[in-house]
Amino acid sequence: MSEIVLTEDCMRLISQFERLTGAGSRDCVIDDRNNRLIFVVNPGEMGLAIGKKGASIKKAMEVMGKKIEVVEYSPSPEQFLKNCFLPAQVVAVGFETEDEGRIAHIEVRQEDRGIAIGKEGKNIFKAKKLAFRQHNISDVTLVTEEEA
């Protein structure tokens, strides 16, 4: 398992996020390229993080001044990757071990491919970054049902 090193900024942001939403967070990624913060919340705390009609997350975005995305942690790499790609529907998750490490192959429905990739690749970037930090997965590739 790769050791997650939280910078002082990340620890401050996690503390602020937890205060604002009431949801516990185990990781934070500052994504300057897409001007957003990505929080990995504890299992079962997604509802707290978002709040009724999105109130908690909206308040956190206003206070923190950035777009915020949350992914629910799972000790299962498969489930965690499925959570990373929501709302895209993941059909299957496969793993293979190469010289450069463990690679996850994510199969999504053809109609969800655009959602899974995200504007300018931001969703696949998020999945790769979090998969490495949380489950030591060195790469994440997308395949559609036709390619599988």
Image (cartoon, grey):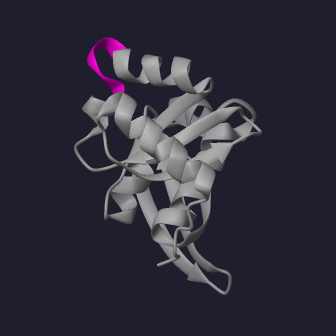
Towards the viewer: 80 or 6: 6
Which residue is depicted at the point 43% across and 36% down?
Answer: 17
Which residue is depicted at the point 53% across and 29% down?
Answer: 111
Vertical relation: 24 (above or below) 128: above
Residue furthest to the left in view is 44
Vertical relation: 23 (above or below) 104: above
Towards the viewer: 145 or 20: 20
Q: Position of residue 51 (x, y in %)?
A: 30, 22
Q: Position of residue 64 (x, y in %)?
A: 57, 27
Q: Is residue 54 left or right of residue 106?
A: left
Any part of residue 91 in sight: no
Q: Is 61 a magenta residue? A: no
Q: Position of residue 32 (x, y in %)?
A: 74, 39
Which residue is depicted at the point 32% across and 64% down?
Answer: 76
Vertical relation: 11 (above or below) 109: below
Q: Position of residue 109 (x, y in %)?
A: 48, 38
Any part of residue 42 in sight: yes
Report the span colored magenta: 50-54
Q: Is 51 a magenta residue? A: yes
Count of labels in the image: 0
Which residue is depicted at the point 32% across and 46% down?
Answer: 24
Towards the viewer: 95 or 135: 135
